[in-house]
Amino acid sequence: MENKHVLVVDDDAGLRDLLQQYLTAQGYRVATVADGTAMSAHLAKYTVDLVILDLMLPGEDGLALARKLRSQGDLPIIILSARGEDVDRIVGLEVGADDYLAKPFNPRELLARIRALLRRSENTQGSAETSGHETHRFGDFVLDTDSRALHRHGVGIALTAGEFNLLRIFVEHPNRVLSRDSIMDMLKGYERSPFDRSIDVRVTRLRRKIEDDPNAPMYIRTVWGEGYLFASGGNRQ
């Protein structure tokens, strides 16, 4: 994990200094900025491995910035906020953040989450480099596990690393019920979080990309009380 570049976006100068000192001591290269404008300028100049993003920022807030970052790629994002309510955590994950930590927090907990996300990101990249060429077809879709690409009628559909990993699990285990625990176990490098609805939120995000009607899914079906079933044929219930 040494030399990984972490960008902290927070308008609290004291917290920025604290995190810069602490994470630098742990072997990371750390940059800090106070708002979204400075974040964009930094990302335009440097390659960043992970962003720590405060929810309450001047100008564009953390949710808007997380949504923008996710639309541009799969850069790992941790949201920090003094608002620790479940609804805020749900919204944070829905817009594309990978994790959410309520203030005040123990820096060691943040460090553990950073390491987990970076490890998962490295595992994802490594599996892409070493896996053989394989495609999975369902309905009008083709999932290429070598290029980590999803196409429908030849048109690419952007997936985050987390969405790709989740979809891959589903297509490799079609027509069987997978519990949330079993899905989490199969997500290599995924560290269990006390926020146990994270799988549900990821499923919701994935449905928006592959279902014609996410409210009446043809592929990723909920089996109440048990988990999810991927119907590879895509027939409506």
Image (spheres, helix red, strand yellow):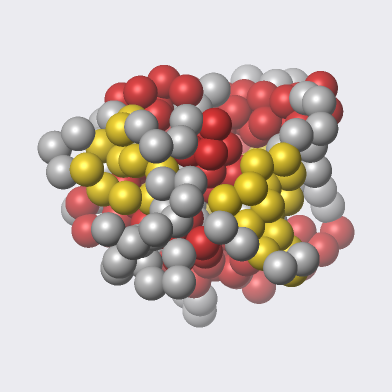
Quadrant of the image containing the C terminus: bottom left
Q: Residue furthest left?
A: 225
| Residue at 38% in and 72% down | 213
Quadrant of the image containing the N terminus: top right
The answer to whether 97 appears left or right of 227 in the picture is right
Of 192 and 23, the residue lying toward us: 192
Q: Where is residue 234 shown, x and y percent of the image?
A: 44, 56
The answer to whether 196 appears left or right of 59 in the picture is left
The answer to whether 114 appears left or right of 151 in the picture is left
Q: Where is residue 235 shown, x and y percent of the image?
A: 39, 58
In the image, is residue 107 above or below residue 228? above
Of 107 and 216, the residue lying toward us: 216
Q: Where is residue 150 shown, x and y percent of the image?
A: 68, 54
| Residue at 13% in and 37% down | 225
- Residue 41, quarter of picture: bottom right
Specify whether residue 175 is in view. Answer: yes
Q: Where is residue 186 shown, x and y percent of the image?
A: 47, 23
Specify whether residue 18 is in view. Answer: no
The answer to whether 130 appears left or right of 205 in the picture is right
In the image, is residue 179 above or below residue 210? above
| Residue at 75% in and 34% down | 134
